[in-house]
Image (cartoon, rainbow, N blue to C red):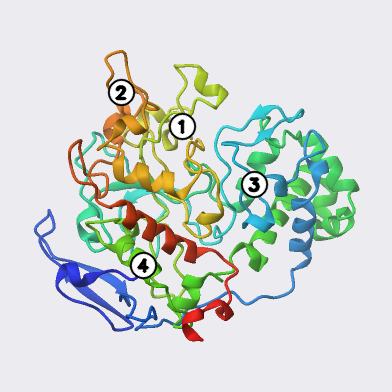
């Protein structure tokens, strides 16, 4: 969870990796937690304990991935003939959306709003399958299982330095999309292609295109005899090709941000970036690292800045979305991924996936409904949501802010009000001042890919 400020715990770890014991957890038993090297920036902004990280080696795309690349940019795979995967996932924007529209306008006539904001496609290659289990953000593996508590239990506080306490929580984790309904990139590719509000293709149309496009011949050869006999198998192979393109193309996971250079001891943070880095990790301040993990684990892979889990943060209802004009309509995230989810997954209604923060500063829409349009807006909401709720939520007839107005009353208890900086109420001092929020944003900008060490003025 980033290089963690362990001065709060009265000690500092500067060795490559070790295990330490935390005591005083609710169960009364000490728990051992594996932690990678952690340290704060030095006075000159350098990393005093640089790490060796395993990076993907660029190589030529396989034949299947080349088919996937052609499909990724093929507008003829949409119902209108005007949309491709790249229409939503712009390569120049790290495969995220362009513009400030909260959701994509798609469909056969480009006049239908998508259900949710467009997520980025970078850094999905290590996403585990969906499961519900212990909240253990430092675990190396996630065991696919579903364990839902019969009743809602108290939420143990979560921070980057106290994973033993929060491990008692049962939380949703893994999966693709904002609700985790797909486990593989192949499954993910199928979703927007056939969604009537997005690419709006139909199965017969896509199969015909796969049989006649410039890439049809190599796809048929790769699909083999079965692909030639079964159109369904040919379709599955096409979706697999899209997945292979995302896995093999280094542009989807370059790990080329200033932070990655800094992590390896090859860059220096500015004073503002260093300040933001420390605040990001401080469990009493930003506490961002509790969910946006920056730890280099035993496998040596770079951090993804997500714990793959889900949170209910109570983003305000976005009335720019046509669906929200209906007062009975609610998008409840995880518990809407299954028909019976609002009953069987009730403790998780209102929870959406914690995204990676890599390349977040290049986005112009945030949260599942695209309600915010800048990192300044997001940080203000995080810090002031319950201190100045009138800034974010409409008032009722009595002039009182309608807290968490995009959730039915029965699910409002799912909202995170335990973890800093959300553990505040009206009249409390914010966890982060405005200048501190500005510093965190400066640090977040170091997570944008495409940085060059030639830009490191501190080395010159």
Give how far apart the Cα atoms at labels 4 and 2 are.
36 Å
Residue beneath disc 2: 409
Give how far apart the Cα atoms at labels 4 and 1 are.
32 Å
Labels 4, 2: front one: 4
Residue beneath disc 1: 336
| Residue beneath the point at 56% across and 54% down | 362
Give how far apart the Cα atoms at labels 3 and 2 are.
34 Å
Labels 3, 1: front one: 3
Picture coordinates of residue 123, whole percent (x, y)? 54, 60
Q: Quadrant of residue 306?
A: bottom left
| Residue beneath the point at 87% across and 53% down | 216
- The single residue placed furthest to the bottom in the displayed view is 460
Going from N to C along the chain, the mark reached first, 3 or 2, is 3
In the image, 227: left or right of 212?
left
Tell me, for residue 98, which label it has, or none: 3
In the image shown, does 415 or 31 lie closer to the viewer?
415
Residue beneath disc 4: 2
């Amino acid at each position: 969870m980033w290089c963690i400020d362990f001065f709060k715990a009265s000690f500092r770890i500067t060795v490559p990796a070790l295990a330490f014991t935390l005591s005083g957890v609710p169960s009364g038993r000490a728990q051992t937690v594996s932690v990678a090297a952690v340290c704060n920036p030095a006075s000159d902004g350098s990393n005093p304990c640089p790490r060796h990280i395993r990076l993907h080696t660029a190589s030529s795309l396989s034949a299947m991935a080349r088919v996937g690349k052609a499909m990724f940019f093929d507008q003829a795979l949409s119902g209108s003939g005007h949309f491709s995967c790249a229409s939503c996932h712009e390569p120049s924007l790290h495969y995220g959306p362009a513009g400030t529209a909260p959701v994509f306008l798609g469909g056969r006539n480009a006049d239908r709003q998508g259900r949710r904001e467009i997520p980025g496609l970078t850094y999905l290659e290590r996403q585990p399958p969906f499961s519900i289990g212990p909240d253990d953000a430092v675990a190396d593996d996630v065991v696919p299982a579903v364990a839902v508590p019969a009743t809602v239990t108290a939420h143990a506080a979560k921070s980057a330095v106290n994973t033993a306490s929060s491990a008692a929580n049962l939380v949703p984790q893994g999966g693709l999309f904002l609700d985790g309904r797909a486990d593989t990139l192949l499954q993910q590719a199928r979703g927007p292609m056939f969604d009537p509000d997005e690419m709006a293709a139909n199965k017969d149309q896509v199969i015909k295109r796969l049989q006649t496009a410039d890439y049809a011949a190599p796809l048929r050869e790769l699909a083999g005899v079965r692909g030639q006999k079964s159109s369904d198998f040919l379709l599955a192979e096409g979706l697999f090709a899209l997945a292979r393109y995302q896995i093999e193309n280094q542009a989807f996971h370059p790990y080329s941000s200033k932070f990655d250079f800094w992590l390896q001891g090859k860059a220096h943070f500015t004073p503002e970036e260093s300040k933001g880095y420390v605040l990001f990790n401080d469990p009493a301040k930003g506490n961002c690292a509790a969910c946006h993990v920056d730890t280099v684990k035993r496998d040596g892979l770079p951090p993804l800045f997500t714990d793959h889990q889900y949170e209910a943060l109570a983003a305000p209802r976005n009335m720019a979305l046509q669906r929200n004009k209906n007062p009975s309509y609610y998008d409840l995230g995880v518990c809407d991924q299954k028909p019976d989810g609002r009953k069987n997954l009730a403790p998780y209604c209102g929870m959406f996936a914690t995204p990676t923060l890599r390349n977040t500063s290049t986005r112009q829409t945030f949260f599942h409904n695209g309600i915010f349009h800048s990192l300044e807006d997001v940080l203000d909401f995080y810090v002031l949501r319950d201190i100045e709720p009138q800034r974010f939520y409409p008032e009722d007839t009595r002039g009182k802010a309608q807290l968490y107005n995009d959730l039915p009353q029965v699910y409002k208890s799912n909202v995170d009000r335990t973890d800093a900086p959300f553990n505040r109420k009206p009249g409390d001092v914010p966890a982060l001042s405005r200048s501190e929020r500005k510093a965190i944003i400066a640090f977040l900008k170091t997570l944008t890919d495409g940085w060059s060490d030639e830009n490191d003025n501190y080395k010159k």
